[in-house]
Amino acid sequence: MIKLGPGNLRIPKFEKPVYIVAAGQTDFRKKYPEKTTEELCIEAFSMAALENDLKVSLSELKRMVNFCVYSQFADHFGDQLLAASKIHDALGFDPLGNIEVKTGGATGGHSVLAGALAVASGYANCVPVVGFERMDEVPTRQGNAYIASAACKNFESELGWMYTAYYALMAQRYQYEHKVPRETLAKIAVKNHGYAVSSPFSQNPMRITVEDVLENTLVSDPLSFLECCVMSTGAAVLILADEETAYTITDQPIRLTAICSGTHTLRTADRRPMEVLRLPHEPEDLYKNYQHDWPGFSSFLAARMAAYLAYHMAGIKNPVEDLDILETHDAFTISDIQTYEDIGLRPYGRGREFIDSGECYHGGKLPTNLSGGLIGSMHAVGATGIFQINEIFWQLQQKWAKFHADPRMWERYGKTKPADFENLQVKNARRGAAISHAGTGSHVTMAILEKV
């Protein structure tokens, strides 16, 4: 049994406050043959620099930058090692130093963590974090195999080189342990595809019903196509700064009060049981009668660890009460409901209550994945964790409508703003969080943002 010591559970702290000052992104598509990866990154950075009501010009902003972080999941897709160097050059940041981060599906979140550490330590005071993925230059079957390589090739790959098969086994185990009806998982797909309808950036928007999901073609039992994330091409950018630099750039910086990470074994069979790591709001005896090994095959220790550290670092006492908006890594409907429990929205075994209660919908206590998430909007992996934080950033600035409701934004991407568009701005939102998740739960970050 794993036993954590005091040093393992030390709460991180930033030596200097870290702020987000701007965000930008492209729309996300299955295929984007008309633009190179460099052009997509330039487009995302241009939005951050020119459309966020900054107090400095593009040229002034670029002269303030002193370090860069790049986020790409796999060199395989574009068949280009050191792809970040090409992006760095295209953005005009040579000869500044930069690093490229790769931690599977959580690459975006860890890239933001790397940028935050550079600012918090004083190493840099203005850091663009640029994420991208080019998933349209290989066939879908080959792309799935590349992605599946982020699990243990000696263990999970025997299941068919496809992540849906990995998570389908988790879904079966979870349903066996906790008796969750298929309709509950289907509700997540309906919600996230539906919110994607109101985003000009989304790849897979649609109004569907629970029946549509249940009758949809299965990818791997019990998960249907409508319950799986999309493979995407696109880019996302955010810019981090210390306090003095942040207020030089904008009057509305959003503080990154915490970003923390957790990991677990790449091979799921190596995961040993332990006592449940309790979050700040969970009473000591909550899991006294819990009948299952934890984390087992249906929970993510990495997510629980990231949440434990982030909540303590940001002073979150109860996430449903203290947060106003949330983005989860809904690669599959089952991973979404697992995350509800891992980050303490409900106790283990009762995650279904969060979706069934209505709290996760717009107008509920903690609206979740109003962006459309990975199921409805995008999963251009290197950009994903950044995209999630961008959406929270604009919500906290009360600028969601600026980037989603303007018909000209839709026209930019060759779309027409739909007649059933919903204004998904969360009124008076002050705190938000985003989960960036990799593998079968091998790496996870949790970021918490706060309006100042």
Image: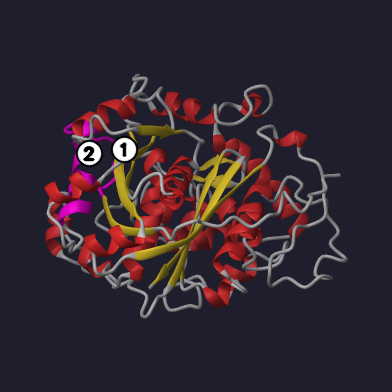
Query: Is 136 rendered above or below residue 254?
Result: above
Residue 31 part of the magenta-drawn span: yes
At a point 58% along the width and 70% down the height, the residue shown is 315
Element under disc 1: loop
Q: Quadrant of residue 269?
A: top right
Of the pair 70 and 135, the residue shown nearer to us: 70
Residue drawn at x 88%, y 65% as measured from the top left:
289
Q: From this viewpoint, is residue 321 visible?
A: yes
Name which residue type carries label 2: Leu
Residue under circle 2? Answer: 40
Q: Position of residue 116 (x, y in %)?
A: 43, 50
Label placed on residue 233:
1
Label 1 amino acid?
Thr
Taking the image as shown, residue 147 lies to the left or right of residue 123, namely right
Q: Residues within 10 Å of mark 1 (few under 14, many from 20)?
A: many
Residue 73, percent from left and from top: 43, 33
Mark 2 lies on a secondary structure that is helix
Residue 235 position in % (x across, y down): 29, 42
Give the residues in magenta. 25-50
Q: Taking 366 as reference, is 91 above or below it? A: above
Pick the front one: 178 or 381: 381
Tell which tag, 1 or 2, sits nearer the viewer: 2
Colour logic = secondary structure
Asked if residue 327 lies left or right of residue 153, the reply is left
Quadrant housing the N terminus:
top right
> Is residue 339 in the magenta section?
no
Q: Nearer the viewer, residue 94 or 212?
A: 94
Towards the viewer: 422 or 95: 95
Confirm or deny contact between disc 1 and disc 2 (CB under 8 A): yes
Query: What residue do we see at 16% from left, 65% from top?
Result: 406
